[in-house]
Image: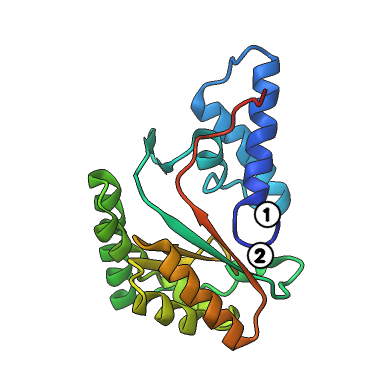
Amino acid sequence: PPRRGLGSSGASAAATVRAIDIIFGGVLKDEELVKAASEGERISSGSAHPDNVAPSLFGGLIVIGREILKFKPDFEFLLAIPWIDVPENKTEYMRNLIPREVPLDKFSRHCLHLSHLMLGIALNDARIFGEGMNYSFVDECRALSIPGFYELRKRAFENGALGVSISGAGPSILILCEDCPKVSKALREEFKRLGIPATILRASPAEGASPSE
């Protein structure tokens, strides 16, 4: 669903670019595919960022620097999608919640957890990756705009979740877990207690955009 922090605009841009490339014989390099699809993101979010288009194109978890690094970790997630009202220009609104300057202690903590994320990906270790998910300066700035986020986060951890973070710009919540049915049941109960309608889906890293039969 659109405007839920699930990368729908990036996925549609990636699918469009992949389809056009296939029509013309698959001539574009990976970097060119990302650049073209990122321009689609510019229309919807105001900036040509590759955060969502790259994994939509190639699948798995993607790190983009001087080259495109692709990882296919064996992780299981839940997506908790609250059906709450969001601003029309949600991505821009959520981006503006993040201050331009970050206190040094928060920056250091953010970098520490980022290193856990990368190590967890490299080692295919869900527990290390989950530790990396559990703090983000960006999430800290956005959490109060998502009703019940901290209550849901607490309930997820109480039932064995390894990591909890905001998905994209929200309001969806991404939960890394080993016992997904147990965590899912607890979250459904918490959403009901909070009076927030929600959908909870099970998810795992998927393949990238490809033609269907």
Residue 50 point in image, percent of width and height: 54, 44
- Identify the image quadrant of residue 61: top left
Pointer 2: residues within 10 angstroms few (<14), some, or many (20+)? some
Q: Image quadrant for the C terminus? A: top right
Task: Check the image and name the residue furthest to the right.
Answer: 88
Amino acid type at circle 1 is Gly
Residue 60 point in image, percent of width and height: 44, 41
Pointer 1: residues within 10 angstroms few (<14), some, or many (20+)? few
Tags 2 and 1 in contact by the CB under 8 Å rule?
yes
Residue at figure coordinates x 32%, y 66% from the top left:
162
Q: In this view, does 33 lie to the left or right of 109?
A: right
Residue 56 point in image, percent of width and height: 56, 40
What's the CA distance linking mark 2 and mark 1? 8 Å
Residue at figure coordinates x 26%, y 60% from the top left:
127
Amino acid type at circle 2 is Glu
Residue at figure coordinates x 55%, y 27% from the top left:
32
Q: Image quadrant for the N terminus? A: bottom right
Q: Looking at the image, is mark 2 or mark 1 earlier in the sequence?
A: 1
Q: Name the residue under label 1.
A: 46
State whether residue 59 appears in this view.
yes
Q: In terms of depth relative to the viewer, which is nearer, 67 or 178?
A: 178
State whether residue 176 appears in this view.
no
| Vertical placement of residue 191 versus 4, above or below | below
Q: Name the residue under label 2.
A: 92
Asked which secondary structure carries label 2, the reply is helix
| Vertical placement of residue 71 versus 191, above or below | above
Counting every numbered tag in the picture gives 2
Q: In terms of depth relative to the viewer, which is nearer, 181 or 211?
A: 181
